[in-house]
């Protein structure tokens, strides 16, 4: 998918951190700790402990949702220890991506239907 | 481990299907009644002899059972509806078996029926915003998993596509299958790309259909004079859900670990090992799944899924026929019916009645289904006579 957002807003991307077992969860407003089951009151919105890491990626060729234009790149992104989420990758094509790339969370363009997408840090620099 | 099915034998005594097909205007009632009437005729039973009906459906909505079943006669039988995503039919079958094993009923029927497109996923109503708009669409997870396996294990696109070639071939021999054309490797690889390395012919189609299975206790078998040579015993029934979403100790993703745990428990409960299986029907909604699940089930060693399928060991007539029905890729996956269709296929094979696609003389089969979430339901079936 072409990148329609040349000047993305740098945003505060957060996860949830459990005050009981210290496990991470996503999203930050989740209903409870996925690890120990503590209630939402035990969770605190917390910035990601490290730069998100791209674990895997594929190009989606077929429109699966009404909002998401294709082709686009979807990846498995490690957000924190034990937290891997499927996410939209901000790139003009998968050829510039590599496994283990560090990513930066940015507000996604409204037309994607996603709140966040992830841009390779190397490309940002 | 539950001993209910060990101590109280339950048998599949009747199977019926409505062919899986692309969406039509045919009402679900017509689809379901076709399968039920065929299952009753196959069992040699009449509707008033059935004490309970468990209806598995994922997309029809509230109270689908009575609306359909009243056309068979209002006998006062117990009716319940089960929804468990793709495992709805498997769960309905499990409930019917447990009802009979528990002594609630002598004869029960599990019915799977669905039309495409009516269902809305609860995951979209949980009050949370997923990171990706595709987060609840299984296709992407499996496309990503396929890419990971290619990178970690050196599997090629042809290794993964080979599953679709086999299963489309099997489906071409199955009159109840949605797809009836054999496909070459070239056709599978050159089909429209969907996501990553998966092409359209490596993905299960959208569709509708119905399946029904009648189960009975050993006492009912004798009392009703049913033919024991056509009865297939339900050796075990297991249902579990996914554990914490991190890779298992062996590095496998949670979903593959779920398959390992559920199939292992089902095999242990049946007092058999994976090498004893003659037949496996499994959730191959996307081709990569079959390669990983035959490993997770122990049908072949870990790391050898592609080699196992590639050298033909999963073909009809070979070591263990995997998805002899055509699987979800070839036979189709209308959700509610799918798990019950697996039971019907294994029963047909164990009886030696799968004309045109009959595996060699077989005694044991595993039906294994995954449902969104993820959940897993596994059953071991055996021919005793």
Image: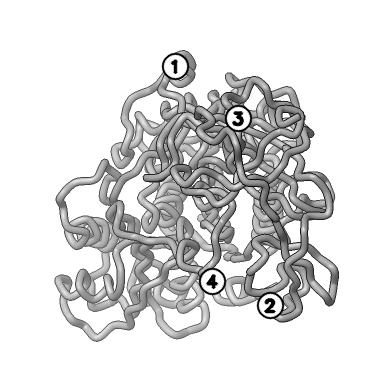
Q: How is the image coloured?
A: one colour
Mark 4–mark 3 CB contact (< 8 Å): no
**Position of B168 compared to A18: left or right?**
left
Q: Quadrant of the C terminus of chain A?
A: top right
Q: Which of the chains bears the disc numbered 4?
A: B
For marks 4 and 1, give the CA distance.
48 Å
Q: Is residue B97 above or below residue B246?
A: below
Callouts 1 and 2 on one subunit: no
Q: Which of the chains bears the disc numbered 3?
A: A
Q: Is residue B254 above or below residue B352?
A: below
Q: Which of the chains bears the disc numbered 1?
A: B
Callouts 3 and 1 on one subunit: no
- Callout 3: 10 Å neighbours few (<14), some, many (20+)? many
Q: Is residue B113 above or below residue B220?
A: above
The tag on residue A40 is: 2
- Callout 4: 10 Å neighbours few (<14), some, many (20+)? some
Q: Nearer the viewer, residue B30 or B221?
A: B30
Q: Nearer the viewer, residue B10 or B59?
A: B59
Question: Which image quarter: residue B79?
Answer: bottom left
For marks 2 and 4, give the CA distance.
46 Å
Mark 2–mark 4 CB contact (< 8 Å): no
Q: Position of residue B6 (x, y in %)?
A: 62, 71
SS at mark 4 in the image: loop
- Residue named by callout 1: B190
The tag on residue A91 is: 3
- Callout 2: 10 Å neighbours few (<14), some, many (20+)? some
Q: Position of residue B129 (x, y in %)?
A: 54, 60
Whether residue B311 is visible to the viewer of this picture, yes or no, is no
Tell me which label, 3 or 2, sits earlier in the chain.
2
- Residue named by callout 4: B9
């Amino acid at each position: 998918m072409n990148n329609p957002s040349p000047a993305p807003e740098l945003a505060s991307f957060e996860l949830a951190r459990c005050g009981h077992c210290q496990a991470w969860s996503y999203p930050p407003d989740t209903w409870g700790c996925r690890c120990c089951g503590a209630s939402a009151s035990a969770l605190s919105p917390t910035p990601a402990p490290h730069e998100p890491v791209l674990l895997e990626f594929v190009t989606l060729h077929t429109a699966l949702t009404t909002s998401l234009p294709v082709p686009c790149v979807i990846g498995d992104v490690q957000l924190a220890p034990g937290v891997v989420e499927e996410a939209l990758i901000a790139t003009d094509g998968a050829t510039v991506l590599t496994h283990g790339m560090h990513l930066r969370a940015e507000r996604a363009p409204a037309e994607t239907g996603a709140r966040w997408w992830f841009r390779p840090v190397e490309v940002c620099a | 481990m539950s001993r209910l099915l060990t101590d109280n034998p339950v048998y599949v005594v009747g199977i019926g299907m409505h062919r899986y097909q692309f969406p039509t205007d045919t009402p679900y009632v017509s689809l379901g009644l076709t399968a039920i009437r065929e299952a009753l005729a196959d069992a040699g039973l009449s509707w008033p002899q059935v004490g309970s009906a468990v209806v598995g459906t994922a997309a029809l909505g509230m109270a689908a059972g009575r609306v359909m079943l009243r056309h068979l006669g209002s006998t006062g039988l117990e009716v319940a509806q089960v929804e468990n995503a793709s495992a709805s039919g498997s769960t309905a079958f499990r409930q019917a078996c447990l009802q009979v094993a528990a002594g609630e009923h002598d004869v029960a029927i599990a019915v799977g029926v669905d039309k495409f497109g009516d269902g809305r996923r609860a995951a979209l109503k949980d009050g949370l915003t997923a990171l990706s708009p595709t987060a609840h669409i299984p296709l992407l997870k499996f496309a990503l998993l396929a890419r990971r396996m290619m990178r970690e294990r050196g599997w090629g696109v042809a290794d993964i596509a080979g599953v679709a070639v086999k299963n489309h071939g099997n489906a071409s021999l199955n009159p109840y299958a949605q797809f009836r054309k054999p496909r070459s490797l070239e056709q599978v690889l050159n089909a429209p790309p969907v996501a990553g390395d998966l092409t359209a012919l490596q993905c299960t189609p959208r569709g509708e259909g119905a399946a029904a299975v009648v189960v009975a206790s050993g006492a009912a078998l004798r009392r009703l004079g049913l033919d024991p040579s056509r009865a297939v015993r339900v050796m075990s029934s297991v249902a579990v859900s996914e554990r914490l979403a991190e890779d298992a100790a062996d590095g496998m993703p949670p979903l593959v670990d779920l398959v390992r745990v559920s199939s292992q428990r089902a095999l242990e409960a049946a007092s058999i090992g994976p090498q004893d299986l003659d037949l496996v029907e499994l959730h191959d909604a996307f081709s990569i799944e079959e390669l990983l699940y035959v490993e997770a089930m122990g049908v072949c060693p870990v790391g050898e899924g592609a080699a196992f399928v590639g050298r033909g060991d999963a073909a009809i007539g070979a070591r263990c026929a995997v998805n002899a029905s055509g699987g979800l890729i070839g036979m189709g996956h209308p959700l509610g019916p799918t798990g019950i269709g697996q039971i019907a296929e294994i029963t047909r094979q164990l009886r030696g009645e799968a004309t045109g696609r009959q595996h060699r003389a077989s005694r044991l089969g595993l039906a294994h289904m995954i449902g969104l979430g993820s959940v897993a339901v596994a059953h071991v079936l055996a021919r005793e006579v």
